[in-house]
């Protein structure tokens, strides 16, 4: 099987696992009365324990060694924030609504990359960014339908994720990936425990325990497959398949909760997805042009 096809399959599997994670969190919170703080803590604690089991306890001391502890802490706090606010939002909104808003994150990264990273976009990508924001307005429809406060939680989650991706880019090549992953889990376990332990509710059934423990495995395996997908193929070839998550979200929403998306959510999410795919296309062109220019300059010298 070609590497690109493997990467696509891994990407689709990864985002499906993330959909399962959100559906599990929604079920535990909305239907079983488990506090959101407890679900967030279980998600980070479960993945941290899974990581130790896979790589062995002797690997743990090496994961503390970082060249940029401040950036690692900041990135980890953004990771905890995006998880917590997303889990809050899905208790009140449909999964297709929250994922449609989350899809705006790559567009917000492109918008913030200029002032924060010095990577300014051209007018075509600027139009794609604006179109993505319009798509989210179609999903939320402020002033037309009653605005639920959970939409704000979803927007905060999306913004935190965009900032998380920007800090991740600044850390690229600074520390090993396992160190960066470990710090996010460590902060999640410590910060999550601070809120979860006072609100702790014992799961009522063995199935609820299983689902609570599964949150860490779903998140950890999803991220592992995501990293592996990007290692097998260029990001420009794999990134558009992130949007497969909308389909898996809709499927789980119907199978588990019996809900179906409304037409405005489908229209708005389509606008956001089209904007994101176009942004990936423009970045691929810009990367190729930059590479060609560098080669011409090298040949001329």
Image: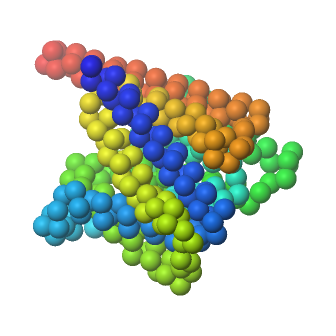
Foreground: 11 or 139?
A: 11
Question: Where residue 159 sits in the image (x, y, percent)?
Answer: 55, 53
Question: Where residue 291 sits in the image (x, y, percent)?
Answer: 27, 22
Disc tally is: 0
Foreground: 137 or 182?
A: 182
Foreground: 135 or 286?
A: 135
| Residue ID at (57%, 51%) | 23
| Residue ID at (63%, 66%) | 32
Q: Is residue 43 above or below residue 147?
A: below
| Residue ID at (53%, 84%) | 198
Question: Where residue 254 sits in the image (x, y, percent)?
Answer: 67, 40
| Residue ID at (46%, 30%) | 241
Question: Where residue 289 sits in the image (x, y, percent)?
Answer: 34, 20
Determine if residue 246 is in view: no
Foreground: 225 or 112?
A: 225
Q: Is residue 300 above or below residue 96?
A: above
Q: Is residue 105 above or below residue 301?
A: below
Name the residue at the bottom extreme.
198
Left or right, 38 with reference to 88 = left
Name the residue at the front extreme.
206
Determine if residue 182 is in view: yes
Which quadrant: the N terminus? top left
Q: How did the renderer colour the structure?
A: rainbow
Left or right, 96 with reference to 45 = right
């Amino acid at each position: 099987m070609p590497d690109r096809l493997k990467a696509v399959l891994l990407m689709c599997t990864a985002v499906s696992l993330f959909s399962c994670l959100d559906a599990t969190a929604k079920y535990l919170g909305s239907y079983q009365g488990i506090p959101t703080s407890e679900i967030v803590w279980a998600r980070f604690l479960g993945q941290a324990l899974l990581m130790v089991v896979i790589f062995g306890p002797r690997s743990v001391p090496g994961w503390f060694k970082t060249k940029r502890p401040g950036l690692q802490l900041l990135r980890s706090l953004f990771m905890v924030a995006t998880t917590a606010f997303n889990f809050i939002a899905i208790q009140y909104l449909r999964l297709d609504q929250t994922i449609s808003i989350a899809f705006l994150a790559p567009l917000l990264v492109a918008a913030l990359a200029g002032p924060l990273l010095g990577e300014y976009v051209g007018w075509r990508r600027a139009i794609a960014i604006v179109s993505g924001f319009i798509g989210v307005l179609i999903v939320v429809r402020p002033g037309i339908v009653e605005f639920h406060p959970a939409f704000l939680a979803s927007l905060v989650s999306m913004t935190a994720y965009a900032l998380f991706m920007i800090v991740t880019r600044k850390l690229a090549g600074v520390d090993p990936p396992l160190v960066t992953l470990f710090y996010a889990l460590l902060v999640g376990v410590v910060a999550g425990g601070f809120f979860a332990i006072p609100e702790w509710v014992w799961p009522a059934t063995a199935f609820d325990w299983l689902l609570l423990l599964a949150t860490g495995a779903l998140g950890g395996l999803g991220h592992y497959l995501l990293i592996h997908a990007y290692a097998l193929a260029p990001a420009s070839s794999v990134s558009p398949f992130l949007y497969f998550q909308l389909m898996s979200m809709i499927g789980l929403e119907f199978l588990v909760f019996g809900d179906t998306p409304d037409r405005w959510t489908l229209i708005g999410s389509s606008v956001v997805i089209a904007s994101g795919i176009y942004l990936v296309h423009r970045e691929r062109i810009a990367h190729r042009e930059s590479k060609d220019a560098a080669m011409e300059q090298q040949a001329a010298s």
